[in-house]
């Protein structure tokens, strides 16, 4: 029952901070991220990141990205495929270069510096999605490019991680890389098949099932199955959920009630827990010792994505204002960078000496990112 009590506390405090931040005309997600820091190890140490919290958080981010897929326009995604690729590529190159240079300047050995630069290559747009949704910007051209670039960015980051970790640990082989690429191709084929033939039939079938909320349950099953498959082929589960959302929204039998009902479930319980969970493990024990390293990594992490992704948007024909929005939307690192850091820590590519500094920088960037996105959108309203 302890978790149930903590769950009630977290949900109640989420209401409080969301109200305060909405009154201040700031995205509520910022308050939820800060709430996680306050409740976690860094301040009060009331809520620990245990299996229960992690499960609710994982369901939360999957539902969040599924909802993003439901609200996405497939035609716009196709139209902006090339800009999305440009945004993702330049949004990886510059952060990697800047972070590698920063790590080497601070005396971190080459092997560890390379891995840290890979950590900061990743983008997690789950936070950006929440800000874009709250400002009704998700279905805009800029919002579409951010979502498309996030998919490409995920694939690039995981590819770099696979090659780098294999090379740095001496466990790299071309055979493993080819197998991984083969799995991704199969996943892509499966997505096309499900999107064109299977999911539309399932959604049609759901209308005839004599059960309460059958279409919503079918949609959730599709979401979780696609998330599982994406995870099994070593892609991010949120990518599978996002693709599932696009597929469901483009089936002829889709109706907006599905989105509204899933949104109710997600935002009432799971999604706030995801945002809170990001800050729970933040500790300040090494903050003073690594102060300047944290400051510089945070700055280069922000500027690398903002300038790199913004440049990718600019050369794709977007205006300076739109490029600022797109660059801002790609800043957040969130769970993707935290997962990569954890993987590196587990295989000794990231030492205990610098682990806390990297985690603090990631969380700081994640908390700061929504401010940039809100400011960029306020300068470029629809």
Image (cartoon, rainbow, N blue to C red):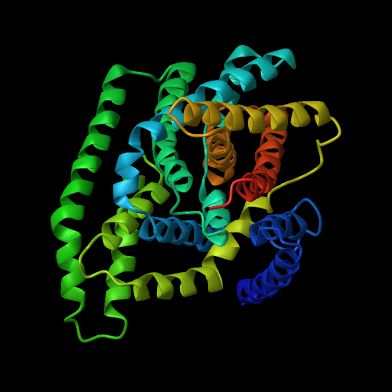
Q: Is residue 315 left or right of residue 321?
A: left
| Residue 53 x, y percent position in the rendering | 58, 62
Query: Would residue 116 appear left or right of 73 to someone viewing this image?
Result: right
Q: Is residue 305 above or below residue 189?
A: above
Residue under the image location 25 percent in, 85 percent down: 211
State the image coordinates of residue 258 (x, y, percent, origin top left): 35, 73
Residue in the foreground of this view, choosing between 356 and 362: 362
Query: Where is 177 relative to 57, above or below?
Result: above
- Counting labels gives 0
The image shows residue 323, relative to residue 37, as above or below, that is: above
Residue 278 or 72: which is nearer the viewer? 72
Residue 352 in view (yes/no): no
The percent coordinates of residue 356 (x first, y second) are: 71, 36
Q: Residue at x 26, y 21 (%)?
A: 175
Pick the residue in front: 78 or 188. 78
Measured from the top left, where is residue 132 in percent x and y?
54, 54
Q: Does residue 284 appear anywhere in the picture? A: yes
Q: Please tell me which residue is depicted at 30% across the width and 72% down the height of the picture.
A: 255
- In front: 372, or 192? 372
Residue occupying image coordinates x 26% and y 69%: 254
Quarter location, residue 32: bottom right
Please identify the quadrant where the N terminus is shown: bottom right
> Eyeballing the image, is 300 above or below 134?
above
């Amino acid at each position: 029952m302890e978790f149930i009590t903590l769950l009630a506390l977290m949900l109640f405090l989420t209401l409080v901070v969301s109200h305060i931040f909405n009154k201040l005309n700031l995205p509520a997600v910022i308050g939820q991220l800060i709430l996680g820091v306050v409740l976690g190890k860094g301040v009060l140490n009331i809520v620990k990141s245990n299996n229960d919290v992690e499960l609710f958080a994982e369901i939360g981010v999957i539902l969040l990205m599924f909802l993003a897929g439901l609200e996405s326009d497939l035609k716009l995604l196709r139209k902006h495929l090339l800009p999305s690729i440009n945004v993702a590529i330049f949004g990886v190159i510059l952060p990697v270069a800047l972070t590698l240079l920063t790590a080497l300047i601070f005396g971190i050995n080459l092997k560890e510096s390379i891995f840290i630069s890979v950590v900061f290559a990743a983008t997690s747009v789950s936070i950006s999605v929440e800000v874009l949704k709250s400002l009704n910007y998700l279905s805009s051209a800029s919002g579409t490019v951010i979502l498309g670039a996030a998919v490409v960015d995920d694939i690039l980051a995981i590819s770099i991680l696979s090659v780098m970790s294999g090379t740095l640990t001496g466990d790299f082989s071309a055979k493993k890389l080819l197998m991984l690429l083969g799995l991704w191709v199969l996943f892509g084929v499966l997505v096309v098949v499900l999107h064109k033939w299977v999911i539309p039939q399932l959604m049609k079938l759901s209308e005839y099932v004599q059960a309460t909320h059958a279409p919503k349950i079918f949609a959730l099953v599709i979401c979780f199955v696609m998330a599982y498959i994406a995870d099994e082929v070593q892609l991010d589960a949120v990518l599978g959920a996002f693709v599932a959302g696009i597929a469901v929204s483009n089936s002829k039998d889709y109706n907006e009630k599905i989105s509204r009902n899933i949104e109710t479930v997600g935002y009432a319980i799971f999604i706030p827990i995801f945002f809170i969970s990001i800050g729970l493990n933040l500790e300040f024990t090494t903050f003073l010792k690594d102060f300047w390293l944290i400051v510089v990594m945070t700055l280069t992490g922000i500027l690398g994505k903002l300038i790199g992704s913004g440049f990718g948007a600019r050369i794709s024909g977007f205006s300076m204002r739109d490029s600022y929005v797109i660059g801002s939307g790609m800043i957040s690192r969130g769970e993707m960078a935290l997962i990569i850091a954890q993987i590196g820590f587990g295989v000794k590519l990231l030492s205990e000496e610098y682990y806390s500094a990297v985690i603090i920088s990631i969380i700081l960037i994640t908390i700061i990112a929504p401010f940039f996105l809100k400011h960029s959108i306020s300068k470029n309203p629809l």
